[in-house]
Amino acid sequence: MAKKIKGKEWYELVAPRLFKNQILGESLVSDPREIKGRSVIRSLSDLGGHPSKYYVRMKFKVDEIDVENKKIKMKYVGQSCLKDFISQMIRKGSSRIDTVVKTKTKDNQNVVVKTIGISLRKINTSVKTALRKEIEEDILNKVNKMNLDDFIMSVIKDSFQVQIRKKLNKTYPIRKFEVRKIEII
């Protein structure tokens, strides 16, 4: 065991500025160039002190390696909700409205936003289509006017979801609305 660790050093994994450069963990590395491409997944409740957001997993990838200070700077590459949480939202006698929207932020980042909405009761296809169209238009309008960090913070603080849900309630009552996945392309 000692032979395997010999020649390796501990490097700190540092979150992006958006998450206040928190330490995500440590990694044992023999050659810093080998760590390129590795990713780390952390719960949002661990990162930002949002205990109610236990179901959101944030994904980070290696961005820069600082050999002198033994730090690895990570970049945000996406987030997703746990499958258990999604299945818990869905109830018998309600309808599920899923959307997938590809768009660009104001700072020219390509983003895929996947959402899920749950209605109060079963709804027919025409109402689902109308709701889906409203969600897609709203996401495109909002995301195109924000930079990536502002968009992520609005999703974390639920202001993004609340605004869309209020707009959808005018068409048909929505019980739950959540951004289930964000991917940076």
Image (cartoon, rainbow, N blue to C red):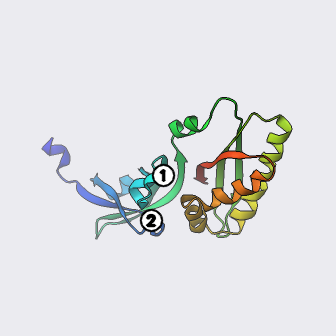
Q: Residue at x 59, y 68 (%)?
A: 150
Q: Residue at x 75, y 58 (%)?
A: 138
Which residue bears the numbered disc 2? 19
x then y, percent, for residue 11 = 29, 60
The amino acid on which the numbered mark 1 sits, given as a three-letter code, is Lys
The amino acid on which the numbered mark 2 sits, given as a three-letter code, is Phe
Judging from the image, what secondary structure is the residue with disc 1 in?
Answer: helix
* Total marks in image: 2
Which residue bears the numbered disc 1? 53
x then y, percent, for residue 120 = 70, 40
x then y, percent, for residue 37 = 45, 52
Left or right for 95, reference 61: right
- The quarter of the rendered structure image containing the C terminus is bottom right
Q: Nearer the viewer, mark 2 or mark 1?
A: 1
Q: Do the residues labelled 2 and 1 touch (CB within 8 Å)?
A: no
x then y, percent, for residue 17 = 45, 69
Q: Residue at x 53, y 45 (%)?
A: 81
Residue 18 in the image: above or below residue 40: below
User: Closest to the observer: 81 or 117?
Assistant: 117
Left or right for 52, reference 3: right
User: Closest to the observer: 58 or 90?
Assistant: 90
> In the orientation shown, which residue stands out farthest toward the top?
92
**Which quadrant of the view contains residue 111?**
bottom right
The crowd level at tag 2 (other Cα within 10 Å; few <14, some 14-19, many 20+) is: some
